[in-house]
Amino acid sequence: MALDAILEEGSVMRASQRLHLSQPAMSAAIARLRQYFNDEIFTISQRKLVPTPLARALERPTRDILLRVRANLISLPRFDPQSSQRRFRMVVSDYASIVLMHPVMKRVYRSAPGISLELIPFNDRVDDQLQRGDVDFVIMPDSYAVDDHPRQHLFDDEFCCIVWSGNRKIGRSLSLGRYLGLGHVTAQFGPIRRPSFEESALVKLGHKRRIEVIAPNFTTMATMVIGTDRIATVHKRLAVVFARSFPLKLLRLPVRIPAFREILQWPVSFDSDPALMWMRETISGVAAEIDRTPAAQMKFG
């Protein structure tokens, strides 16, 4: 556990805090590792701990061992949602939070009142979070799926345009030329500013838009068109929710881009955890209800 903590934290102080140990106790653990492996394990370079090649080679097997311990010894053999106090940690976008997790939370509240859900925003470490078992679930587009971990299809969605309802320059429909010529609001995610699904799809089709605003999430995108002549391209299911709360109107997207497929992923080490199996069934049940309302049948104009 000491090796795993210090490999991830890169600091004796942070690793000791994570394991609730004193710094002398953590230093003693490192000394025992050095003696056992006959290796320095860590060196100091520019005031930073730098793992040796052996320590790096031990990183994944160490994490795998700890995950197996958690999966086989700590997880209860049976799960009772009515009495459980379990906390589930999930990586989700604001899109998934609004369209999927809001109805999921209402169902969980009724059937498992002691359970809590922690929704974590996307970052650039999803694959590492799954590998380390730091999160229970990730809900994301299938194009971002992480290899070596189970996945389950949840529902499909399509895209449409949203504009301010007071925008008099845009009628009930758009040509492709008009669409590309407007000022656009889009979103980018995480520290590396990963482009949104619709932006990547349009680039692949060879279409270049005039991006005037880059928002940190989909909800901000919707608010950024209000009071302007700008346009945003968002998921249809989300647009319908936004139109109930914001002065927006929906328009058909004048170019066909691939359907958006939302999936659920979880750490392979916890595939048989009864609590995660119950939550997967709950999420997939709500997703099936969402999928029975085809996005293509939603009204525009």
Image (spheres, rainbow, N blue to C red):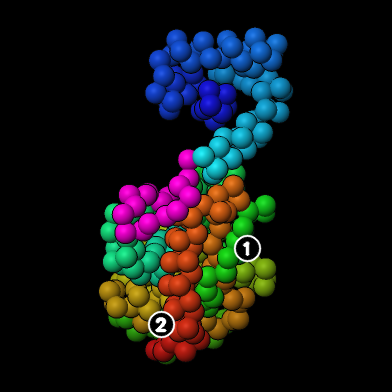
Circle 1 residue: 143
In the rendered structure, which amino acid carries the disc numbered 2?
Answer: Leu
Q: Quadrant of residue 246?
A: bottom left
Amino acid on which disc 1 is placed: Ser
Looking at the picture, tell me which residue is in the foreground, 164 or 120.
Answer: 120
Q: Nearer the viewer, residue 155 or 193?
A: 155
Q: x and y percent of residue 217 in the render?
A: 42, 59
> Along the line of sight, which residue is nearer the eye, 14 or 135?
135
User: At x 55% / y 18%, what residue is drawn?
Assistant: 48
Residue 101 visible at all:
yes
Q: Is residue 276 above or below residue 232?
A: above
Residue 78 among magenta residues: yes
The mark that comes first in sequence, 1 or 2, is 1
Across and down, in percent, residue 56 comes to: 67, 27
Q: Which mark is residue 87?
A: none
The residue depicted at 64 percent of the width and 21 percent of the height is: 51
Which residue is depicted at the point 59% across and 81% down? 255
118 left or right of 49?
A: left
3D distance between C-alphas at marks 1 and 2? 26 Å
Q: Which residue is mark 2?
A: 250
Label 1, residues with CA under 10 Å away: few <14, some 14-19, many ≥20? few
User: Which quadrant holds residue 202?
Assistant: bottom right
